[in-house]
């Protein structure tokens, strides 16, 4: 790699971390809206390999990345068990860039300012269903132009601290912690990936929010970075975003835009929180569905 490219990469990492720090500080004073507004729409230009899971924004490259989920095929004499799931790249305006297959059954993607990478957490990271290849957390590699590549680096292998095999953890870059919602419950495990057990467990007060566990997204709770309003949960049945603090106390409810159509699959995937927006996938909008970026904070 030449010196100029090396300098570019170092500059990109520094810029990304700087932008991330500014964004975190800026939203620490935010207030929950009564009614949300749609800020961006990202239509899928390629048919998802199975079902879009989550979305992440890289602040230095200024690109969005949508990750599909999907189990690997059973191993055979001619094929190794690698997931055919895809990752799709879009520019800052939501225009399609490219698609590649790094080979993971993605459950959650997020930007890590420390590594400067979009990282992916796979299905069964906890090894609840037994160990399988390509299970854990991996760093997805990109071109300097923002295009996604089909190569990656391993960060950690399986870790039982994440609990449920279906969990779609969100990431807190300031404290280097994950919030892993447990399936069909109000429980959230707080995970330090260097430890093999959760460092804390949060019980979300759904009753105070006027909801039950089967009203809300099954395996995903967003981390917003807003002090005292850190956790955001999609309430499908009441078409709202429910906001909680890190004690699990209910803070506020934000009604989602009326034009957004929610479906049964939104309980399980098609979600995300990135670039200061809650993202929800509308599968009936456009040929292959559309992600809505929703602003729930003032």
Image (spheres, rainbow, N blue to C red):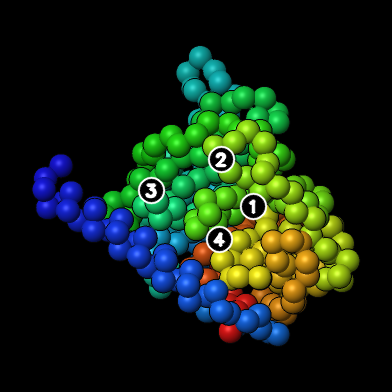
Q: Is residue 66 visible?
A: no
Name which residue lies at 79% across and 60% down: 204
Dots 4, 1 in contact, CB < 8 A:
no
Q: Given this view, does label 4 or label 1 mark the residue nearer the observer?
A: 1
Which residue is denoted by mark 2 in the rendering? Answer: 193
| Other residues around mark 4 within 10 Å, as few (<14) / some (14–19) / many (≥20) | some
Q: Position of residue 31 (x, y in %)?
A: 63, 81
Left or right: where 220 falls relative to 143: right
User: Closest to the observer: 71 or 224?
Assistant: 224
Q: Residue furthest top?
A: 77
Dots 4, 2 in contact, CB < 8 A:
no
Q: Provide the secondary structure element on which disc 2 rests.
A: loop
Which residue is denoted by mark 3 in the rendering? Answer: 115
Q: Position of residue 12 (x, y in %)?
A: 27, 58
Which residue is denoted by mark 4 in the rendering? Answer: 288
146 up-or-down from 163: above or below: below
Query: If you read the primary sequence from the N terminus, does the residue marked by circle 3 or circle 2 appear first?
Result: 3
Which residue is denoted by mark 1 in the rendering? Answer: 179
User: Closest to the observer: 187 or 80?
Assistant: 187
Q: Provide the secondary structure element on which disc 1 rests.
A: strand
Alpha-carbon distance for marks 4 and 1?
Answer: 29 Å
Name which residue lies at 59% across and 36% down: 195
Q: Given this view, does label 3 or label 4 mark the residue nearer the observer?
A: 3
| Other residues around mark 3 within 10 Å, as few (<14) / some (14–19) / many (≥20) | few
159 up-or-down from 284: above or below: above
């Amino acid at each position: 790699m030449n010196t100029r490219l090396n300098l570019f990469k170092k500059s990109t990492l520094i810029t990304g971390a700087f932008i991330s720090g500014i964004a975190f500080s800026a939203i620490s004073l935010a207030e929950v809206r009564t009614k949300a507004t749609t800020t961006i729409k990202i239509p899928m230009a390629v048919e998802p390999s199975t079902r879009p899971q989550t979305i992440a924004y890289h602040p230095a490259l200024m690109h969005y990345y949508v990750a599909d989920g999907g189990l690997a095929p059973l191993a055979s004499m001619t094929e190794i068990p690698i997931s055919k799931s895809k990752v799709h790249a879009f520019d800052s305006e939501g225009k399609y860039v490219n698609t590649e297959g790094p080979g993971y059954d993605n459950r959650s993607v997020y930007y890590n300012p420390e590594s400067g990478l979009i990282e992916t957490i796979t299905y069964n990271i906890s090894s609840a269903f037994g160990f399988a290849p390509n299970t854990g957390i991996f760093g997805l590699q990109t071109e300097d132009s923002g295009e996604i590549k089909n190569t990656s680096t391993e960060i950690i292998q399986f870790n039982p601290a994440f609990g449920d095999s279906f969990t779609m953890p969100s990431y807190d870059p300031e404290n280097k912690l994950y919030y892993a919602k447990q399936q069909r419950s109000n429980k959230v495990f707080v995970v330090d990936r260097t430890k093999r057990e959760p460092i804390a467990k949060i019980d979300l007060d759904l009753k105070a929010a006027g909801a039950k566990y089967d009203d809300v997204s099954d395996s995903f709770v967003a981390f917003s970075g807003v002090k005292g309003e850190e956790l955001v949960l999609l309430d499908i049945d009441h078409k709202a975003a429910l906001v909680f603090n890190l004690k699990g106390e209910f803070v506020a409810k934000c009604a989602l835009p009326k034009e957004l159509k929610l479906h049964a699959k939104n309980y399980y995937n098609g979600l995300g929180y990135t670039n200061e927006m809650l993202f929800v996938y509308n599968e009936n909008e456009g040929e292959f569905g559309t992600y809505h970026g929703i602003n729930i904070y003032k």
